Amino acid sequence: MVRIPACHAGGRGFESRPLRHLFIVTSQNPFLVFILRELTDFVCLTACYPALIALLWPQNYKLSEFMSVLLSCDSVSKSFIDGKNEVQVLRDITFSVNASEQIAILGSSGSGKSTLLHILGALDTPSSGTVEVDGQSLFALNSNQQARFRNQTMGFVYQFHHLLPEFNAVENVAMPLLIAGENPDKARLIANEMLAKVSLQHRIEHKPSALSGGERQRVAIARALVNKPKLVLADEPTGNLDKSTGEAIADLLAELRESLQMAFIVVTHDLQLAAQFDRVLTLSSGQLEERTK
């Protein structure tokens, strides 16, 4: 059997069952043995990896076994009653998001983007279908359990900042930590550090009324990220901002996604913002489709 050097990125090597199987099967193919012997650098192996999967991957394994699926949305539909009519907003939506994956969902106004995002965050319930986040079925939880799970696992950014007007920037950012039971002094320290990440360390004592629109959105982003959530859901995060401020917020989100390695799902109608993401999905007529970038 060919000996493959371990990759230590993220603290994980090639020790999972599917990977061992892949390399055992590979060793039985003389042509691929030759290729693997030539690949002494792991970067080269990574570059060739999709081709090896296509050639060798057993049908009884799924590619998702390679990755950690963070969110799974299965056959989600949502309809509303409008008088005597039933309006179906979402139709049998199925997709998944891996840990640290960045996904944009495009759609016109009224397409159901926000409804889908609210369901993914357990802020609304589907008419049918299931959503799992980090292995937890969201709608198997009661409302209190959902609130606790959101606080520990998710962060939310909205088109409007929704900051509490009577509290200053650092107090707003610290709020999710305090709700989670963190020590107030430590919560303030962590909130200060997060505000520094969004370049607002000089505005921590300012209340929302004393901040510009872009600064308020930066505070809202810091609040969404302060608990180090595994998943961030953002609903038109640049939609209420002028062009230059919106571009600055989009750049900030890109920097934070890169540095913090959290999974992001952003719904938007902004093609330029969507182009920055790993995958782009389009919501139209209640159905979700992969978009070619």
Image (spheres, helix red, strand yellow):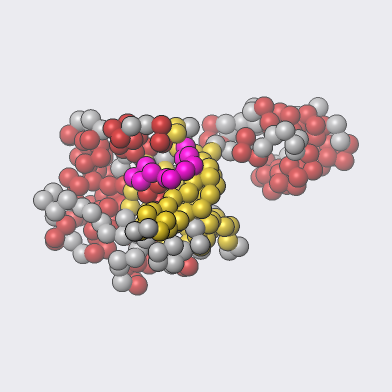
How many discs mark residues in the rendered view? 0
Q: Is residue 174 in sight in this rendering?
A: yes
Check the image and name the residue furthest to the bottom. 243
**Residue 99 x, y percent position in the rendering:** 50, 41
- The quadrant of the picture occupied by the N terminus is top right
Instruction: Please report the residue visible at 62 percent of the width from the left and 35 percent of the height from the top.
Output: 65
Instruction: Please report the residue visible at 40 percent of the width from the left and 66 percent of the height from the top.
Output: 109
Instruction: Please report the residue visible at 47 percent of the width from the left and 68 percent of the height from the top.
Output: 272
Instruction: Please report the residue visible at 31 percent of the width from the left and 55 percent of the height from the top.
Output: 158
Left or right side of 73 for 212: left
Residue 123 sits inside the magenta stretch: yes
When the figure is inspected, residue 190 is found, relative to residue 217, above or below; the finding is: above
Location of residue 88 by image quarter: bottom left
Residue 60 sits inside the magenta stretch: no
Check the image and name the residue furthest to the right. 30
Left or right side of 111 for 176: left
**Residue 118 x, y percent position in the rendering:** 37, 49
When the figure is inspected, residue 280 is found, relative to residue 192, above or below; the finding is: below
**Residue 98 x, y percent position in the rendering:** 53, 42
Range of the magenta residues?
A: 121-132
Left or right side of 205 for 263: right
Please tell me which residue lies in front, 212 or 129: 129
**Residue 229 x, y percent position in the rendering:** 37, 40
When the figure is inspected, residue 138 is found, relative to residue 203, above or below; the finding is: above
Check the image and name the residue furthest to the left. 166
- The quadrant of the picture occupied by the C terminus is bottom right
Q: Is residue 189 in sight in this rendering?
A: no
Please tell me which residue lies in front, 118 or 205: 118
